[in-house]
Amino acid sequence: MTHNLWLKTRKHSIILSTLLFIYSLPATADSVDSLIVDIMDKRHIPGLQLAIVKNGEIIKQGNYGLSNFQDNVPVKVNTLFPINSMTKAFTGVALIQLVEQGHLSLDDQIGKHLTDIPASWKSMKIKHLMAHTSGLPEILSGYQADLLVRGNPDASWEKVKELPVRFEENTQFDYNQTGYVIIGKIIDKYVKGGFQKFITDNQLKIVDMQLTATAGFEHMARPIANQARQYLYDCSKGEHRNFYGEFPYIMQTAAGMSSTATEIAHYLVALQEGKLIKNLNSLWTPVTLKNNQTAGFNDFENGYAMGWQVINRENHSAISASGGNAVTMIYYPEDKLSIVVLTNLLGGLPIQFVDQIAAEYIPGFQF
């Protein structure tokens, strides 16, 4: 089979798999399905999972395309997608739970809780680590998810402590994984069994996220039943590439979990109903810089809170959490609408098209 024919065959397999899903629905496919199919085609997304929540109830679920190119495996309701940095949202909830239990405050200096850190770090506040405004040096090398010392978490931790602070605390936003390594160490100080068990027991089990709990925090380091493969798309060659990454324990407060759109939808409902924490404001209020402005990834995601992004705008403000530029969960409080989009394409960027989906459920919504 020639290379071009292989690509066409793969593309047709995705379309066929998606259409088979649509025609298996109990009712005629709606405009959302057509929208999703069109977006997947334009963005070269192999597989996608969707869940919509309105007024606390799941009103739509969708499974589209392929979770695995190699074996033509379709996306199903129990397909687990790696969620990468969306894991930070669960870490944020864990931190607020410890705040509500009286173990710490978001305004605490980290030196109050840890001693094995450089003197220049000790006065940094917990909330600034969570919001990526600390100025800490980066524990990653800059190449994909590699640590400073590839394959050696302990050596990477020692090396990052030798590096200079990047900027004055809370003067700018700079996405940084080192802060979440420190948060993991703080959580581990106050819970038995470590942060993984704490998140599993106090979030996943409460929401009955059984598939998520079983998958654990190891991303793609071990075989996980029904897990979607992750891909990159090479525009210059017009082809998909496999992506494989591992996150060691020290990085798993920042990334590593896998989940389904349906289980995350239930998670968002549980949060909104106060089943996990009492004060959502403490979780979702963005950190304000010294210049009294908020900052985030761009003008759209223009604030960052405790592991969650904030979309502050005149109409339809939202709270979101994304990962790997592949998955997004978003909550529109004034519209009582939540949307979960999980894809297996790094660079699929559902945060860029989630408003299009929202417009199908919010009358007059302009994006």
Image: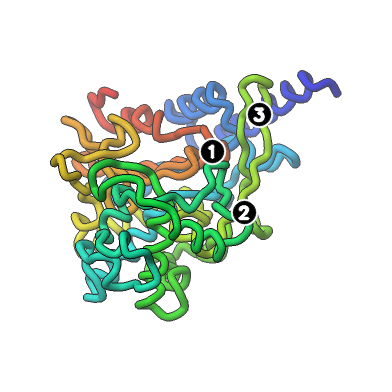
Circle nearer the viewer, 3 or 2:
2
What kind of residue is marked 3? Answer: Leu
- Disc 2 marks which residue? 150
Which secondary structure lies at badge 1? strand
**Alpha carbon distance from label 3 to label 2:** 41 Å
Label located before the other in sequence (1 or 3): 3
**Alpha carbon distance from label 2 to label 1:** 31 Å
Q: Quadrant of the N terminus?
A: top right
Instruction: Look at 70% across and 37% down and name the residue there.
Output: 69
Residue 262, compared with residue 16, is above or below; it is below
The reply to whether the C-beta atoms of the residues labelled 1 and 3 are less than 8 Å apart is: no
Instruction: Look at 48% across and 35% down and name the residue there.
Output: 27
Q: Nearer the viewer, residue 79 or 34?
A: 79
Residue 263, compared with residue 316, is above or below; it is below
Q: Can you give x and y, in whole percent of width and height, for residue 28 in the image? A: 49, 30
- Disc 3 marks which residue? 16
Circle nearer the viewer, 1 or 3:
1
- Disc 1 marks which residue? 48
